[in-house]
Amino acid sequence: MLQAMDQLTALYDQLVDEDMTDYQKVKAIYEGVMARTDYNNTVFHKYQGSSDWDAMLSDPEFVLSQTWLGVVKGADVVCGGYSQAVSSLLDLAGIPNFVVTSYSGDMSHAWNKVLLDGKWYNLDATWGDGGNSSQFFLRSDQSFLRDGHQDYGWDGTSEDALLFPAQQDYR
C-alpha cells in the first residue's frame, strides 16, 4: 500500500505544479485522470445490476476498477475509480471535495463535488472522458440533472451533497 501511495503522489506531482491556482489544479487533475484511464466496459456489463458481492469482490478486475489504485496502475476503471482518483488527488492538493453517488433502479453512478472560490461544483471525469469534457466540469446540480445525471441517492455522501448544493456553473 505504501508503494501505491507513492505512485499516487508521483501522479499528483506529474499533474500539479504548486504555483498553479486552485482552478488550474482542479482542471489538471480532472484532465489528467481522464488521460490516464479509459472506461472499463467489461466490468460494467459483467456486473450491471448484480448483487452478487462475493463474485464481485473476488474478481480483481472489478475491485481495481472501483478504486483510485486502478487509475494509478493504468487500469481501466468505472465511475468509482474515476471519482476516487479525482478525490484522492484533490485531497493531496488540499482542495475540499467528496464523492457523490446516485442510484436509479439497478444503476448507480459516482462523481465529485469540489469547493472552488467558496462555491461547490460538480465534476464527472467518467462522463467527461466519454466526449465533451467541459460539459461535466464545474457544473451546477441543475445542469447535471438536465444533462442526464440521476438525482442523489440516500447514502452518507449524497446527504453531504444535499448540504452543499452546486447552485451555478463555474464561469
Image: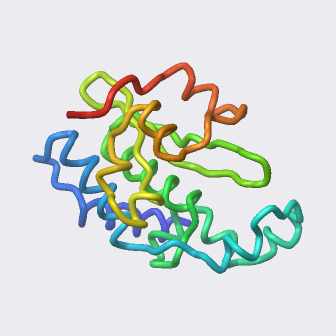
Residue 128 falls in which quadrant of the image?
Answer: bottom left
Residue sitting at x 33%, y 40%: 138
Q: Quick one: 89 or 144, which is closer to the camera? A: 144
Q: Give the side of residue 60 with respect to residue 140, left or right.
A: right
> Which residue is rendered at x = 53% and y = 71% of the image?
70
Number of numbered callouts drawn: 0
Q: Is residue 121 left or right of residue 79?
A: left
Left or right side of 142 for 25: left
Q: Quadrant of the N terminus?
A: bottom right
Residue 12 picture location, percent across and down: 31, 60
Residue situated in front as seen by the camera: 131 or 116: 131
- Looking at the picture, the colour scheme in use is rainbow
Choose between 28 and 69: the one closer to the eye.
28
Q: Is residue 70 above or below residue 153?
A: below
Percent of width and height locating residue 123: 40, 45
Residue 77's spot in the image, x, y percent? 55, 70
Q: Quadrant of the C terminus?
A: top left
Looking at this view, name the residue that lies furthest to the left.
19
Provide residue 141's location: percent of width, then percent of height: 46, 31
5 w.r.t. 153: above or below: below
- Say which residue appears at 62% left-offset and 43% top-offset: 101
